[in-house]
Image (tube, coloured by chain):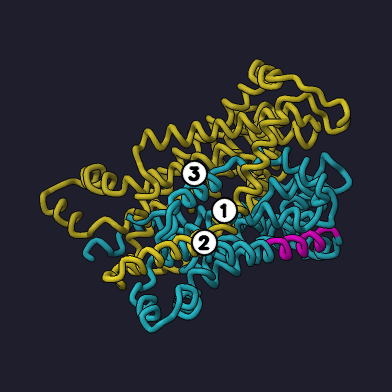
């Protein structure tokens, strides 16, 4: 509060300035807040409302209030649970692998003294590339006719069809997802890593701590906040997985995600009622995951960033 | 500093990072040079047997693809510009002013950043058809702005907090108003941060797929990622693999150029916005 300390003697003027600052503050944030809520809060309420109707876009006049029957039909359908399972599986698997590989990359980037620019540039390419392009690259790589993966992997037959079975197709989807997002994870972890004082590691070394002890006793506990932020962001992002599935399998072989199911109901089948119910459920799932992770980590994201 | 020397493990890690990041890119490049006849017959080998530029000329002569490129550039640039202007105002207020409800604004931004975008597809589709925004540029610019704002606000407010307080104070002591202090002192100091936020915002808009496929129906506004996904050619069961690869490379070039030019800034922007201990 610099404005207060600047004029400590004049109480009346101080409160004027405070009020003015308050007003200016809201004037400056208003456009951003309006813009963010316009496209999210209002449509979300609209979805909540529409989810209570039987409503097909092809027959808009037949709209009929049906209460919670859309939710009942979604939640009693095994397709919904299959898709929830796929989504959670992909989320857990990709985030776990990304955390390990991303941490290894962060360690390398932290220690490297040469060619920093080259490493930074390469790591940013998967981050910046369009997800659809990544999905195509890996779809072709795994494809039966044009892929190099079968030829390169010694324990896989040359005629193995990765997209012919559910688990192998999900594996291919995870590879594309992991490839694209590990760099982002590693950059977040690198930021946490660079905040650990070098002297602390030296001290541990002098005291005779082994490499593993230093890793688990010094490095990891000291970058807890960075790890949590990275996991939270990536987990919620992975839960929304859509692009990779759309391009690689279109949901074939039971590889559909919750996002893909919602999209298919609304855009391909014009079932706005059921689609809206799915939208609401998807939103609630994300809320639940976010809430669980924040509680689990006991991390205050705002204070983790130094926000008071 | 004793730890930071070239050890074998760092060397292996260096190579691993390069292979990880670049192998799929090299793969797509190789694929894009294979003749269409080769990929149709099936060519599981990594390198092309015969090399050709024809995929690139085919893609470049495709009017739909060219149109999608124009759409993507136009929509992403406009959304970036507007989003960064609004975010700059907001981030300034968050970093420099004391006002009630600051935390609320940051929480909203955080919530939007984690929002499941697909859940908006239905209601937005419905709304956009009512307001005649469906399949138009503004129809995509508006959601892109909303979803890039959180990233821009967080990155910018982190940058703004690093700017020396005293400069602004000095200007205010010299009789400048808060607004003048913002315009004359902070803006020049903040320009690099704003630029970084713009790059990250552009990446986000350029990458979007969900809105791109669900809020457009023709080439009038369909952006590149959607166009790529629908680019199946005449035979649905035999997509033009090598042409798709060429198109993928064309849309990746702008990203690579930006990364090459501004890698240092992008890394600073990504990390400062996320973790500050």
Q: Quadrant of the C terminus of chain B?
A: bottom left
- Decide whether residue B230 is among the magenta residues: no
Q: Residue at x 56, y 39 (%)?
A: A174
Label ID, residue A33: 1
Which of the two discs, 3 and 1, sits closer to the camera?
1
Q: Nearer the viewer, residue B111 or B236?
A: B111
Left or right position of A103 against A155: left
Q: Which residue is mark 3?
A: A234
Among the chains pictured, the one given yellow colouring is A
Q: CA distance from mark 2 to mark 3?
A: 25 Å
Contact (Cβ within 8 Å) of mark 2 with mark 1: yes
Do marks 2 and 3 share a subunit? no
Q: Quadrant of residue A127?
A: bottom right
Q: Residue at x 37, y 68 (%)?
A: B162
Label ID, residue B90: 2
**In terms of secondary structure, where does tag 1 sit?**
helix
Which residues fall within the magenta stretch? B64-76
User: What is the tally of numbered marks visible in this picture?
Assistant: 3
Chain B's colour is cyan
State the image coordinates of residue A5 (x, y, percent, origin top left): 29, 69
State the image coordinates of residue B79 (x, y, percent, origin top left): 66, 61
Residue B27 appearing in the image: no
Q: Could you tell me which chain the residue with mark 3 belongs to? A: A
């Amino acid at each position: 509060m610099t404005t207060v300390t600047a004029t400590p003697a004049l109480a009346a003027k101080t409160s004027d300035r405070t009020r003015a600052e308050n007003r200016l503050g809201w004037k400056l944030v208003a456009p951003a807040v309006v813009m963010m809520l316009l496209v999210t809060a209002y449509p979300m309420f609209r979805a909540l409302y529409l989810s209570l109707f039987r409503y097909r876009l092809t027959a808009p006049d037949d709209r009929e209030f049906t209460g919670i029957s859309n939710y009942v039909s979604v939640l009693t359908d095994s397709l919904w649970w299959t898709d929830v399972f796929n989504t959670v599986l992909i989320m857990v698997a990709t985030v776990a692998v990304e955390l390990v590989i991303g941490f290894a990359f962060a360690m390398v980037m932290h220690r490297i003294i040469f060619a920093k620019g080259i490493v930074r540039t390469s790591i940013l390419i998967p981050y910046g590339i369009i997800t659809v392009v990544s999905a195509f690259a890996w779809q072709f790589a795994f494809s039966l006719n044009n892929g190099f993966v079968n030829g390169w992997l010694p324990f896989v037959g040359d005629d193995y069809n990765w997209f012919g079975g559910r688990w192998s197709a999900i594996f291919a989807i995870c590879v594309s997802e992991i490839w694209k997002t590990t760099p982002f994870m590693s950059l977040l972890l690198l930021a946490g890593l660079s905040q650990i004082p070098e002297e602390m590691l030296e001290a541990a070394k002098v005291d005779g701590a082994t490499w593993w002890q230093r890793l688990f006793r010094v490095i990891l506990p000291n970058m807890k906040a960075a790890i949590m932020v990275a996991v939270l962001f990536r987990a919620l992002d992975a839960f929304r997985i859509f692009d990779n599935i759309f391009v690689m399998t279109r949901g074939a072989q039971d590889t559909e995600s919750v996002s893909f199911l919602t999209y298919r109901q609304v855009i391909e089948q014009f079932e706005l009622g059921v689609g809206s119910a799915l939208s609401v459920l998807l939103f609630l799932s994300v809320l639940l995951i976010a809430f669980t992770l924040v509680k689990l980590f006991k991390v205050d994201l705002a204070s983790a960033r130094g926000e008071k | 500093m004793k730890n930071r020397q070239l050890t074998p493990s760092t060397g292996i890690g260096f190579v691993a990072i390069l292979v990880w990041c670049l192998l799929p890119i090299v793969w797509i490049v190789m694929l894009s040079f294979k003749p269409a006849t080769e990929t149709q017959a099936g060519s599981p080998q990594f390198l092309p047997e015969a090399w050709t530029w024809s995929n690139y000329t085919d893609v470049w002569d495709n009017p739909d693809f060219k149109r999608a490129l124009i759409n993507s550039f136009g929509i992403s640039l406009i959304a970036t510009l507007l989003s960064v202007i609004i975010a700059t105002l907001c981030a300034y207020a968050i970093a420099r002013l004391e006002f009630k409800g600051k935390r609320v604004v940051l929480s909203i931004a955080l919530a939007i950043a984690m929002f499941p975008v697909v859940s908006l597809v239905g209601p937005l589709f419905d709304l956009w058809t009512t307001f005649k925004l469906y399949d138009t540029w503004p129809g995509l610019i508006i959601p892109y702005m909303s979803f890039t704002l959180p990233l821009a606000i967080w990155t910018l407010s982190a940058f703004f907090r690093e700017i020396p307080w005293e400069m602004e104070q000095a200007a205010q002591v010299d009789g400048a108003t808060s607004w003048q202090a913002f315009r004359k002192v902070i803006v020049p100091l903040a320009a690099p941060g704003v630029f970084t936020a713009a790059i990250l915002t552009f990446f986000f808009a350029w990458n979007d797929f969900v809105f791109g496929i669900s809020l457009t129906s023709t080439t009038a506004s369909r952006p590149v990622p959607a166009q790529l996904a629908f680019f199946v050619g005449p035979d649905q069961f035999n997509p033009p693999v090598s042409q798709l690869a060429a198109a993928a490379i064309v849309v990746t070039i702008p990203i690579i150029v930006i990364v090459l030019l501004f890698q240092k800034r992008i890394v600073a922007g990504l990390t400062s916005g996320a973790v500050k201990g």
